[in-house]
Amino acid sequence: MAIGVGESSPVVTWVKYQGFAGPKIDGRIRVPVPETDLHMDHAYYLVAQLEAPTYGAVQAYDGCGMSAGPLHNIAVYPRDLSQGSLFPLLGSLERSQVPTTALLALLIAYREQGWVIGTDGKVRRTRDSKLVGGTEIRAAFTPPDGNVPRAGTNWETSRRWALLHHAVFADPNYFNAQKMGAQTWLFNASKNTGFYRGKDMFALSAGKDLTPQEDLALSVYHAYSVNAPAVAREVLSDAMVGTKKKGSFPAALISGFSRATYGNWQARYLRTRDAALKSGIWPSTFFSGKSAVFPLRSAIVG
């Protein structure tokens, strides 16, 4: 069921997912293929293709309350209902420039809810600065309890919240800030681990500081890390320990992800390979033939 909100407005769709339900809005402008050789630009692009390839994509149907941004930053974690990374990202957008009309509208709505995003990136009550609980956040965004009905007052409430968040993340004024926020998250998750230890990730350039093969393999690492950082770090560590020959590390790292069985990572391998190949960032020979470092899983030996 899709509900329009005006001829030129985004379409809000009701989606049922497991024991949850709520609105979804697709973005309109795709994250562009980078024109630089910077490794983190390549990594950001590949991760976005897996998570949210269009600016303005919003979903509120999977128990997270609300998610938006290129990494699908969530409001709350469904398992323990602790606050997620959506609010720190919104805080960084607010600090990036004078707030636009779209962001002001969202922040006013938060104020009307009795909330404010603190300097620590947490949603706090305006009356006493205490943290807002995840149960309250999810109930506010997706009433009554993360399972929004198909129509009625609760649907209209959730739909309004989805549109308010969509307007911010679809605003071109915030595209670069979203990119920087995503890259900072990826950086913080990996800066002191494995291959990146002691290096300035933001300055690394493919062809200069990294071989093109390393650039691809580490971008693939980020495409997995965003889904499960600790598990991805283990794969990275194993690849570094298990390879001593120069040039063997990229193939070993990607091969490690091809064997990983965490979550839906078997399907993620194919999706990541398809996105990387279609991007044109890396030579097609990296994906098939004798020099392939990211082949089809069936072509991996050992």
Image (spheres, rainbow, N blue to C red):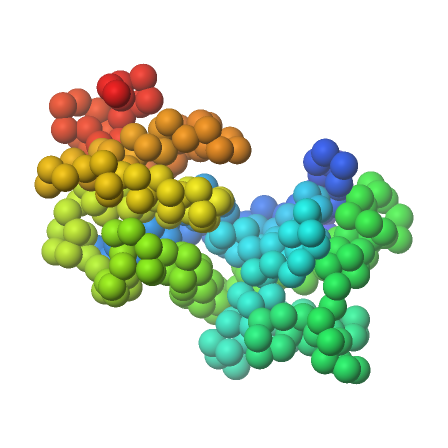
User: Can residue 42 be seen here?
Assistant: no
x and y, in percent, of residue 203 in the image = 23, 64
Q: If the image is split into quadrants, where does the C terminus sit?
A: top left
Return the residue nearer the eye: 145 or 29. 145
Return the residue nearer the eye: 248 or 76. 248
x and y, in percent, of residue 43 in the image = 33, 50
Residue at horizontal 67 percent and vertical 58 percent from the top: 82
Residue at horizontal 10 percent and vertical 41 percent from the top: 246
Q: Residue furthest front?
A: 241
Residue at horizontal 37 percent and vertical 27 percent from the top: 259
How many numbered markers are drawn? 0
x and y, in percent, of residue 104 in the image = 64, 75
Residue at horizontal 68 percent and vertical 43 percent from the top: 62
Q: If the image is split into quadrants, where does the N terminus sit?
A: top right
Task: Name the quadrant containing residue 85.
Answer: bottom right
Q: Determine whether 268 is above or below 289 in the image.
A: below
Residue 35 falls left or right of residue 80: left
x and y, in percent, of residue 260 in the image = 41, 30
